[in-house]
Image (cartoon, rainbow, N blue to C red):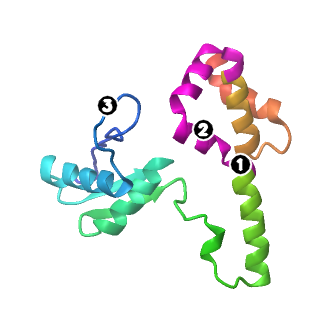
Amino acid sequence: PPDSFTVVAPSLPGYALSFAPGQKRFSVEAIADCFADLMTDVLGYARFAAQGGDWGSFIAARLGFAHADRVLGIHLNLMPIRRDPAMVIDPSPEERRYLDQLTTWLKEETGYQWIQGTRPQTLAFALTDSPAGLAAWIIEKFRAWSDCGGDLDREVREFFKPLRD
């Protein structure tokens, strides 16, 4: 029917066990190019939409930029923006306050990205070996990323309620 659609959810190259030792790595640009070719050249769609969250948001944004002739639209649930305070030359006082807050946020809230990006297997073994460690990791993310208003217990109980019912 004309109001229907097909969902294609390709795995991101470079995640889990998708690489052989010594294999060339994919950049965001290369993944976007690969996915655009997959959708049009391999699967035969003239145009398609893309949705992305986390790393997928960088790829979906790149698809919209580099392949606008093939992409109907993109939906992102993470804004893939550059976060380098040094990019702003001669900031206004308001921009300076923002950049100071950004610098603090980058220092305090992005450590997980560095460990997951540089030592993912170390973290994976630690979290899968320790249920308490995994719970602490997840609960800390709820505290940092939710609008729990200080009531972390309620937030966690509500999130896991479907598993209890």
Dots 3, 2 in contact, CB < 8 A:
no
Q: Nearer the viewer, mark 3 or mark 1?
A: 3
Q: Which mark is residue 109?
A: 1
Q: Earlier in the sequence, mark 2 or mark 1?
A: 1
Q: Earlier in the sequence, mark 3 or mark 2?
A: 3
92 in magenta: no
**Total numbered circles:** 3
16 relative to 127 in the view: left or right: left
Question: Does residue 165 appear anywhere in the picture?
Answer: no
Question: Does residue 123 appear anywhere in the picture?
Answer: yes
Q: Measured along the vertical axis of the image, is residue 105 above or below residue 43?
A: below
Q: Name the amino acid type tagged 1.
A: Glu
Neighbours of disc 1 within 10 Å: few (<14), some (14-19), many (20+): few
Q: Which mark is residue 21?
A: 3
For label 2, the residue is: 115
**Residue placed most toward the observer, 152 or 63:** 63
Q: What stretch is highlighted in magenta?
A: 108-133
The prevailing secondary structure element of the residues shown in magenta is helix
**Residue placed most toward the observer, 87 or 144:** 87
